[in-house]
Amino acid sequence: MDDIVNLSIVGVLIALTAFFVASEFAIVKVRSSRIDQLVAEGSKKAMVAKKVTSRLDEYLSACQLGITVTSLGLGWIGKPAVKELLVRGFGLTNIPDSVISLISATLAFSIITFLHVVVGELAPKTLAIQKAEKMTLWLSGPLHAFYILMFPFIYVLNGSARVLTKMMGIDMGSEKEHSHSEEELKILLSESLKNGEINPSEYNYMNKIFDFDNRIAREIMVPRREICAIPEDMPLDEILSIMTQEKYTRFPVFSGDKDHVIGMLNKKQLFADLVYQGEKDQLKIQDYIYPVIEVIDTIPIQELLVKMQRDRMHMAILTDEYGGTSGLVTTEDILEEIVGDIRDEFDEDEQPVIQKRADHHYVLDGKVRLEEVQDLIEMSYHDEEIDTIGGLILNENIDIREGQSIYLDDIRMKVLEMDGRYVKKIDLKKGVTSTDKGNTRTGLDIKEPLLVNEMTLSEK
């Protein structure tokens, strides 16, 4: 009867060891954000789990206390109990008593150690790591009860540990909630994508949000030369003609030139009143001009978006450091930085700013940012004053014309289309050889007429 009781105690002690080990690893492994979500959904188990995970130092001490006590109990009761059974079994043989005692002690130690390590620690540890959320919800209640029961001992042990660490010159400070850096969050998102927790679209949106905070308005603006603006003294018929031809909703209005924007016109409101009133002579353009936001072109786009939301405006005029108009930004331009291009029924003829022709061969809009080009191909070029690929070309050769090329190592940038000095379209190809370049000393493209202003960037 005593043997059964002792073995039962051994089983209970191993089970308790497994409980404390599983609790320890589960509450460390579980995501606090997931527990918060379950609490918001009203889960009672999650509410207890939140208490446990928010005070890890104290509850881990409870786990350690439990593991230590059960381990001592196994050593005190388990080994003698198993040894006694083995001695009785070997006593039926003709083995000398001294040998039986040695063999029984060795086997008893081995059996208890195996059960303690495998059943009491390794198996529950693996289970807790693999099923951290479920194990935390299941075990937090009993662990909380044990913590309350053993609170005086845990308090003394934790206090003693703090005194010891202070004597060693280590100030534990107050316990702070662990937070993740931006790079850590990107890694977590990558893992979630691999495991199917989020889809590729969600992953791309989140990555673009991280980049969103690093963008300034100048990088996404419609340049001054591309702004379709209306002089304040333009006759109504001409204004209606422009609005009919250009498929925009809002048009900046300027006085004198584009450096003096005084407001904007909303085509919808103007056309609606024209339809209802029917008399163009009764309409005064000045009555339809609304204020417009004016900001410096280096403003971060997240700040600009907040300002546009606060002022309830969909358009902002950007000015440069000298007070002149450098471009404009709409809410659509800002949103496209997160969700990608937004096309409507009037954008059928609009070409993508990046068109892939082959591997390492693209046709680019001159407004494409250098960061985007560097994401497409390996390109080494750094100039804090240059934002776009078109700006790079003009910076290297201000006199370049259509059909001419410049080279950066094995990258050819050929101008396909220009508007005055503005580079509109570029043929970009990586991996060109010296034969493709023609005269390697000057970088002339022999497929085009010889142009003395063509050169390799590395020689400039």
Image (cartoon, grey):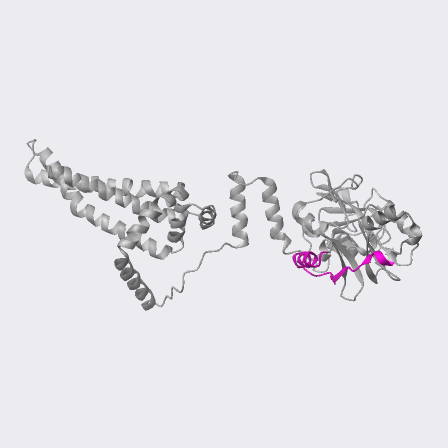
- For the point 68% across and 45% down, which residue is it? 340
Q: Is residue 98 above or below residue 332?
A: above
Image location (x, y in percent) of residue 456: 76, 52
Q: Image check: 335 left or right of 449?
A: left
Q: Which of 261 and 205 is in front in this view?
A: 261
Can residue 82 be spotted in the picture?
Answer: no
| Of residues 395 and 61, the one drawn nearer to the viewer in this rendering | 61
Q: In x, y percent, where is residue 89? A: 11, 33
Q: In which quarter of the image is the N terminus?
A: top left
Which image quarter is the C terminus in? bottom right
Using the rendered view, name the quadrant where residue 6 is placed.
top left
The range drawn in magenta is: 286-312
Against 310, residue 187 (above or below) is above
Residue 302 covered by magenta stretch:
yes
Identify whether 345 is placed above or below 50. Answer: above
Residue 243, horizontal then vertical, whole percent: 86, 48
* Side of 60 relative to 246 (left or right): left
Residue 52 falls inside the magenta stretch: no
**Could you tell whether 212 is left or right of 266 in the image?**
left
Residue 409: percent from left, percent from top: 71, 49
- Give the residue at the far top of this rendering: 93
**Residue nearest the observer in this picture, 370 or 96:** 370
Work out whether residue 60 can be spotted: yes
